[in-house]
Each structure stands twice: as structure tokens, then as C-alpha cells.
Image (cartoon, rainbow, N blue to C red):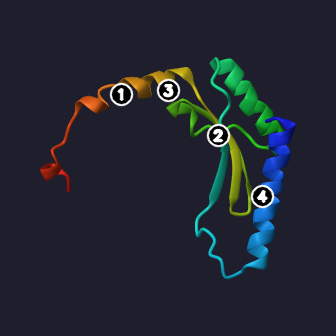
Amino acid sequence: MTHDRHSALIGGLRDLADFLDANPAVPVPSTEITITVYPTRADDEEMRAVVDTMAAGLGAEINPNDLPYGHYSTCRNFGPVQYGAVAIMREAREKYAAQTSYEDNIQVPPSQVA
């Protein structure tokens, strides 16, 4: 993230926090809020390096539960706000592309849509 984008994100989050603090009647989500950084698509090693750097900065581990799905991820929770990174490995992207490659060829008549 460039310095300008980094600063803009921090400013936006602070503005949101100040707004919510000043307007307690405004509803907030009842579920966790997740902010996810996706590394720029590159080879798997480069994307893992980005996530590793983020994990080190967050003081977090790589999530072993995501590895079987081809996702290399890390996160840290700040109360109900989760901040993390996910790199989707080449094999997982290719598998997904193959599974969805015929999606547009299947047409369901409106009368069969529930």
C-alpha cells in the first residue's frame, strides 16, 4: 500500500470511528467486520511473501485451516474488526476457473427458479 493510500485508509477509519461515536443512534453491524488485503497477483512465492510480511507485522500466524483450500492467509482481531491478508494460490485459482468455466452455458428457465 502506498503511503498516500495508507494515510487515506487510516484517516477514513478515524473519521468513521468519530462519526459513530458522535452518532450513537446510527446502527452498526451485528457481525464481525473484516478488512482483507489481497496481494497483487504474482507467482505463489511472491504472494506468500506479502502475507508473511503482514503476519509478522500483525504478530499473527498463517491460518493452517485455509491451506487445504489453496488460501494462504493471516489475520488479527481488533475487537469485532478483523484485519488480514489472503493470497489465493495458482492451483486454487485454476481449479475455480475450471469449475466455473461452463457457468454461462447453463440456462435455467424462469419457471424453474424457486
Q: Earlier in the sequence, mark 3 or mark 2?
A: 2
User: Is disc 4 surrounded by few (<14), some (14 to 19) or many (20+) residues within 10 Å?
Assistant: few
Coordinates of residue 53 in the picture (x, y in percent)? 80, 32
Q: Earlier in the sequence, mark 4 or mark 3?
A: 4
**Mark in the foreground, 4 or 3:** 4
Marks 1/3: CA–CA distance:
10 Å
Could you say which disc has been placed on residue 63 in the image?
2
In the image: residue 11, left or right of residue 48: right
Marks 2/4: CA–CA distance:
26 Å
Question: Which residue appears at 73% of the width and 63% of the height?
Answer: 79
Screen quadrant of the N terminus? top right
In the image: residue 19, left or right of residue 34: right
Marks 4/3: CA–CA distance:
32 Å
Q: Amino acid at mark 2?
A: Asn
Q: Earlier in the sequence, mark 2 or mark 4?
A: 4
Closest to the observer, 32 or 105: 105
Q: Amino acid at mark 4?
A: Leu
Marks 3/2: CA–CA distance:
16 Å
Q: Secondary structure at mark 2?
A: loop
Q: Earlier in the sequence, mark 4 or mark 1?
A: 4
In the image: residue 7, left or right of residue 24: right
Could you say which disc has been placed on residue 7 in the image?
none
Closest to the observer, 13 or 52: 13
**Mark in the foreground, 1 or 2:** 1
Q: Is residue 41 above or below residue 57?
A: above
Q: Report the residue marked by disc 1.
A: 99
Q: Is residue 104 above or below residue 46?
A: below
**Mark in the foreground, 3 or 2:** 3
Q: Report the residue marked by disc 4.
A: 13
